[in-house]
Image: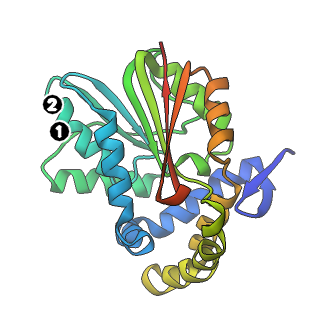
């Protein structure tokens, strides 16, 4: 059976989705709090930049993949307006329920759908914008997921991938200490789950660097890919355009 990476561990491909699901079932109810603590609130800045760069217009169709607690979908729904169509999606039922409930609490009702990003259940060229925020690295076959995102993005539209990446050289020693010592400790103290945050740190190290991901997106069917590096390369926003 073909194997893939679950963090630094090698597992059968069929097991990876189940293991990732276990991580997010475990952390769903503390997800936003942990994001704030882990990034010192910077994840809000990264997402705000993504939302501003997306420039969603009234009436547009948007798909937020691995949308988690729904912060991007909420912002997009306000910009797309009543004549627009914004979907919140996630492969994980716990995360999707958390996101749906949070949106309802904010007075926003949008369609929520659970699916695997390697099999997006929408027609070709359907969306003006597809986004995935801190979710691509958890996908078993990233190249297939990117092909699917390209397929459902209409000509003139774009797909945006916001993801942890590889920091510049001088930051790496500090980043390693933080990732492998501080993150699991925080996970244990706040979420009662050190292992899930150990996986988080490992999954970031196994994710393609900025240039590799750019080439993967071009191979997946995008005509042009723009890269924005943030916080010394710790995070990168890749924008794939279709013409």
Residue at the outermost right position: 1
Q: Residue at x 33, y 37 (%)?
A: 53
Q: Residue at x 45, y 16 (%)?
A: 123
Q: Residue at x 42, y 37 (%)?
A: 131
Q: Give residue 33's position: percent from left, percent from top.
A: 35, 72
In the image shown, does 98 or 40 lie closer to the viewer? 40
Q: Residue at x 50, y 79 (%)?
A: 187
- In the displayed structure, does residue 75 sit left or right of residue 121? left
Q: Give residue 110's position: percent from left, percent from top.
A: 24, 38
Residue 67 disc label: none
Q: Please tell me how crowded label 2 is: few (under 14), some (14-19), or many (20+) other residues with Cα within 10 Å.
A: some
In the image shown, does 152 or 205 lie closer to the viewer? 205
- The residue that mark 1 highlights is 78
Q: Do the numbered discs 2 and 1 sit on residues whose CB atoms are within 8 Å?
A: yes
- In the displayed structure, does residue 142 sit left or right of residue 107? right
Query: From mark 2 to mark 1, how far is it between C-alphas?
Result: 5 Å
Question: Is residue 226 shown to the viewer in this render?
Answer: yes
Q: Is residue 159 above or below residue 202?
A: above
* Coloration mode: rainbow
Residue 109 location, quadrant: top left
Q: Give residue 218's position: percent from left, percent from top.
A: 63, 25
Which SS class for mark 2?
loop
- The residue that mark 2 highlights is 81
Q: Is residue 222 above or below residue 232?
A: above
Residue at the outermost front position: 170
Question: Is residue 70 shown to the viewer in this render?
Answer: no
For the N terminus, the image quarter is: top right
Q: Give residue 214's position: percent from left, percent from top.
A: 62, 35
């Amino acid at each position: 059976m073909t194997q893939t990476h679950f963090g630094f561990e090698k597992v059968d491909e069929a097991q990876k989705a189940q293991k990732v699901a276990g991580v997010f079932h475990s952390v769903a109810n503390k997800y936003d709090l942990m994001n704030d603590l882990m990034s010192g609130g910077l994840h809000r800045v990264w997402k705000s930049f993504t939302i501003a760069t997306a420039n969603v217009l009234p009436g547009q169709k948007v798909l937020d993949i691995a949308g988690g607690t729904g912060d991007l979908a909420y912002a997009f729904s306000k910009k797309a307006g009543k004549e627009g169509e914004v979907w919140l999606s996630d492969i994980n039922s716990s995360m999707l329920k958390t996101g749906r409930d949070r949106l309802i609490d904010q007075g926003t009702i949008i369609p929520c759908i659970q699916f695997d990003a390697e099999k997006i259940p929408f027609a070709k060229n359907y969306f003006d914008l597809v986004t995935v925020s801190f979710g691509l690295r958890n996908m078993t076959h990233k190249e297939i997921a990117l092909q699917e995102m390209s397929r459902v993005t209409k000509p003139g539209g774009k797909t945006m991938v916001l993801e942890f990446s590889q920091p510049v050289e001088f930051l790496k020693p500090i980043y390693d200490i933080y990732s492998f010592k501080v993150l699991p400790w925080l996970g244990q103290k706040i979420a009662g789950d050190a292992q899930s945050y150990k996986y988080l740190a490992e999954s970031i190290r196994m994710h393609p660097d900025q240039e590799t991901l750019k080439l993967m997106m071009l191979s997946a069917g995008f005509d042009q890919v723009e890269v924005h590096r943030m916080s010394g390369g710790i995070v990168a926003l890749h924008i794939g355009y279709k013409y």
